[in-house]
Image (cartoon, rainbow, N blue to C red):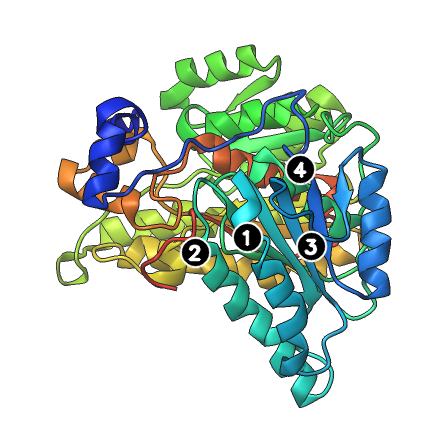
Amino acid sequence: MTDIYSRLVNKGPGRDVAKKLGLPQPAVLRRYEPGQPLINGPVLIEGSSAGADELAAELLTWDVDVRRHAVPREKLGGIVLVLDSLASPVDLEKPVLTVASSLRDLAPNGRVVTVSLTPDGGSPAAAAARQGVDGLLRSLAKELRAGATGNGILLADGVGTTAPTALGALRFFLSGRSAYVDGQFVRVGSTSGKLPADDEKPLAGKVAVVTGAARGIGAAIARTLHRDGATVVAVDIPAAGDHLAAVANDIRGTALQLDISRDDAGPRIIEHAVGRHGRLDILVHNAGITRDKLLVNMDHGRWSSVIGVNIAAQLRINEALLASEHFRSAPRIVSLASTSGIAGNRGQTNYAASKGGVIGMVRATAPLLAEHGGSINAVAPGFIETEMTARMPFATREIARRLNSLQQGGRPQDVAEAIAFLASDSAGGISGEVLRVCGQQLVGA
């Protein structure tokens, strides 16, 4: 859906009026397109540890113009702040204030990425410093302008800055694939994973199933996974058959008309994927419904249908996958959660409960997939421009668009890019995590 306000305040007289009145001026975000460079401009690597040196050397192999010291008034495409040797909160001052002097040189749509250790280890002083990075990064992300974003990578003990998934996460955050991800952290819990041979086809040879694929975010996910090299099975209810067939034909995949709330949905998905394509590597749980009402007016039908589709169906399908011999080779599951399941939303107690349930399911299922080298994660979208949000009242929609650090709604493609990353082998060391795609939503958690 077109954001008319953003178009008006980004060119001509509208831009001047918005600037004088102090109105929001959402930047045009640099989103990924095949063939584009990883990042526009040099990348400053700040940090004095061995991990910072190793990371700088690795980026040089990516044909990135690396700086170890800032050049005055040189426009920077990105800043990577390596904080993997913090022993005390006082250790934050020197590297952080050094980077502060370069923030004015960050180009539009620039990137700031912190690399630090998880706070659940070390001495109290070290834990305090590591947790301090959380508040620091989230606050900095709210200060950035012109489409620039700030995100963080958390390394578990024993995971170095150049572990495969640490590098995969850094590529994601530096690239246009993360355009609407802001103020977020991903935790790299292991050295699992591997970088793709072809950065533009990271899912080559994989077979992926996407539920709810007939339209909107689901269709965008299916197209993105296909673009990245996967063979896609598009799943949706029979009533959406025409739209589903169009998506499947467009991406040269196959369509499976199926109500995922059926008891036999899991076995049917496996049978179709393996029977038609010989394997099953990735499952994306995108299908979901809303039946909004204030809790005081909630009835059995609205409650049970939302829980049934949004979480109970996923649990049954996952149970079938975990029991199947066909889901054993580094399998990936990615589920759609929602910021409503994290922060809540008025009139959505049933929906928020189901999406909170997705997050709990993801965390509990991660250890069950680990023995097969697999992973499961969730993506939690914020305000995304879809047919559903287009039906919102005008004033409500406009407010929702501006209540994030990027001052605009996201696109289905933004959600799809995050899912494609988490479904790839380069994210193999990330499991049981929730990645928000919300432009750093300002209200709630």
Residue under label 1, please give it: 103
Side of 108 relative to 42 (left or right): left
> Residue at left 55%, top 52%?
103
Secondary structure of the residue carrying numbered label 4: strand
Determine which of the numbered discs, if any, sits on residue 132 in the image.
none
Residue 222 rendering spot, x and y as whole percentages = 55, 26
Query: Residue visible at 75% across and 30% down?
Result: 199
Classify mark 1: helix, strand or loop.
Answer: helix
Q: Is residue 256 above or below residue 287?
A: above
* Residue kind at label 3, given as amino acid type: Ile
Contact between marks 3 and 4 (CB within 8 A): the answer is no
Residue 316 position within the rendered picture, expressed as x and y whole percent measured from the top left:
54, 49
* Residue 431 appears in view: yes
Q: CA distance from mark 3 to mark 2?
A: 28 Å
**Residue 282, labelled with which disc?**
4
Write down the quadrant of residue 443 in the picture.
bottom left
